[in-house]
Amino acid sequence: MKRLYVITLSVLLMFLWLVPAALAADPTPVNTGRVLLSTQGDLTMPAGDQADLVFVTQGKATIAGDVNTLVVIQGSADLTGAHVGSILAIQSPVTLGAGTVVTGDIRTVDSTVTQTGGAQVQGTVRDVGLDLAGIGLILAPAIFLLWIGFVLATIAAGLLLAALGARQVRMAEGLISHEPGHTLLWGIAGVLVPMVIVIALFVTVIGAPIGLGILFGLWPLTAFLGYLVAGIWVGDWVLHRLTPEIVRERPYLASILGILILQVLTIVPFITAIASLFGFGAVLLLAWRTFHQGNVPSASVAHPAAPAPMAS
C-alpha cells in the first residue's frame, strides 16, 4: 500500500511540475519518444544514449547520456556528464557529478541533491512538500463539501424510499433480522454473480449493451437500495433501544439516523461494507421471493430485535 501511494504521488507530481517543465525547457535535450523503465532493479544509461523519459523505482539510475525527464522513486540517481531536462526524486538521493547539466528544475520529496565537479542546475532545486501541503489545503474543503452533499443526497433518497416503499423496507429489514446468514450469502452472491454474467455478455455484440446496462445501471442502483435499507435497519435498531415504547409506521427518522451512522462508520474499515452487504442481500432475496412466489408474507419489523450485523 505504501509503495502504491508513493508511485501515485510521483505520477501526480509528474503532471503538476515535470511535464510543464519539459515542455517549457529550452533547449530540449532530446526528442526521441524513447522511454526507459526499471522496477526493483538498476538502470545504466551510457554516454551518447538518449531518452525522453527514464523511470526507476527501487533501484539505482546511473545516467551519462541525454534525458528529458528523470524520475527516481525509493532508489538513487548518479549522473556523470549527463544532460537532463528535469528531475523528480522521491525518497531517493541524487548525485550530480562532473560535466552534468540540468536545464530545468529538480523536484524532491524526502530526498537530497549533491553537486560535485562543477555540475550545473540551470533551474531550481526545491522540496515540493510545501506545494503538496498547499494542494491539500485547497482540496480538503472541496472534498468536505462534496462529502456533505453526498450525505444530504443519500438521506433524501432514504426519506423517499421510506415514503414510497415503507412496507417493502420493513420486509427487507425482517430478512436481515430473522435470516441474517441467508441474507449475507445473497449479498455476496449479488456482488460476484453479476460480474460473471457481465463478462459473459461482453463476448457477444448483442449482449454487450445489456452487460453495460447491468454494470452501470441495474447493479449500482440495486446496491444503492441495499445501502439505504441497511441504513434504515441500523436506524430502527438504535431507535428501538432508545425508545422501545414508540411504534413508527414509516421509518423517516430511522433513515436519517441510520444513514448518518453508516457515514460515520466509514472511518472503520469494512464495517459499512458489511452492513451494505446485508442490505444488498435483503433487497435481492426479497425481490427473488416476490417474483418466485408472487407475494411474500409481511413480517412485523417495526423494531428489529436481532443484533446489528456490524457488531460482529
Image: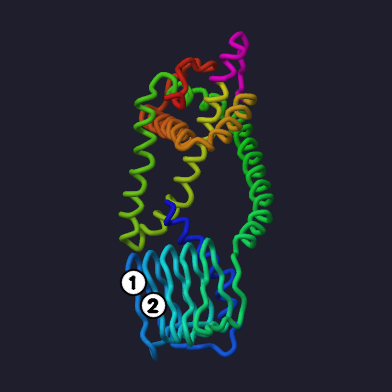
| Residue 247 belongs to magenta span | yes
Task: In the rendered view, tell whether residue 121 sits above or below residue 126.
Answer: below
- The residue sitting at 45% across, 69% down in the picture is 72
Image side of residue 305 versus residue 147, left or right: left
- The residue sitting at 39% across, 91% down in the picture is 48
Q: Give the range drawn in magenta.
A: 237-251
Colour setting: rainbow
The residue lying furthest to the front in this view is 117
- What mark, if any, has residue 205 been given in the picture? none
Task: In the rendered view, tell whether residue 57 sits above or below residue 82.
Answer: above
**Mark 1 is on which residue type?**
Asp
**Mark 2 is on which residue type?**
Thr
Badge 1: few (under 14), some or many (20 or more) residues near its Cα, within 10 Å? some
Q: Are marks 1 and 2 in contact (CB under 8 Å)?
A: yes
Q: What separation in Å lies between label 1 and label 2 (alpha carbons)?
A: 8 Å
The residue lying furthest to the top in this view is 245
Q: Is the magenta stretch mostly helix, strand or loop?
A: loop
Residue behind mark 2:
62
Image side of residue 108 versus residue 145, left or right: left
SS for tag 1? loop
SS for tag 2? strand
